[in-house]
Amino acid sequence: MNSVDISWIWDYLFIFLARVTDVSIGTLRLMLMVRGRRWLASVLSFFEVGVWLLALTRVLSNLDNPWKMLVYCLGFATGVYVGQWIEELLALGVSSAQVIPRSAEAAQALRDALRQEGFGVTTLMGEGRQGPRMVLLVTSPRRGIPRLLEIIRRYDDHAFVTVIDTRASLGGHMQLGRR
């Protein structure tokens, strides 16, 4: 392989990795914007656009090479995946869960278990198709949701559970469940 071929390989690798980086940063920036973290989102946008310009410059320097365009597109697609994966690992923000256990006994046992594990739980009475139901409301940092779902499954694997991202919360008792 001569030096020209090797430089093209490095060029392709640079374009691909730059796109993965800038799109991953963009995904995180978007998640921060949705959660109201404007300052950090603005800082990330500076780096996102800088890396994007570097990648785009490499592609536009030789429009006769369709492989650069393909690598650019592959980097974008990979960056979307990597950005979401990183965001899930960071688990930024707060989530709220509504849990409707199948019976009053299951609801009480689950409520007590969740409190024992450090989750704040509020109970309400609701009305379902088959009569009165206890509804458990739990707000937790997102990283605590897998543990919350694990406890729910252990106590009532037929409970109806919804989990939503919470934009903001104020007051109350909320801590990550103990391990």
Image (tube, rainbow, N blue to C red):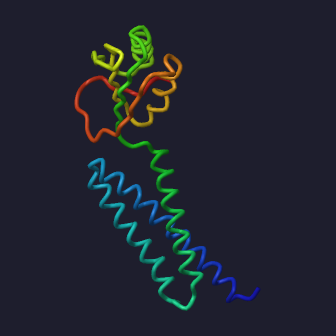
Residue 177 position by quadrant: top left
Residue that appears at 30% across and 23% down: 173
Q: Position of residue 11 (x, y in %)?
A: 59, 80
Q: Position of residue 55 (x, y in %)?
A: 48, 76
Furthest residue toward top: 105
Name of the residue lying farthest toward the left: 170
Which residue ends up furthest to the right in the rendered image?
1
Q: Would you place residue 168 above or below residue 123 in this image?
A: below
Measuring from the top left, give residue 49's x and y in whole percent: 38, 71
Against 2, is 167 above or below? above
| Residue farthest to the front, as pictured | 129
Q: Residue at x 56, y 77 (%)?
A: 70
Describe residue 175's horizontal placement relative to residue 84 as left or right: left
Q: Residue at x 46, y 77 (%)?
A: 54
Q: Find residue 59 and report its horizontal and vertical position in percent.
A: 50, 83
Q: Residue at x 23, y 27 (%)?
A: 171
Q: Is residue 168 above or below residue 11?
A: above
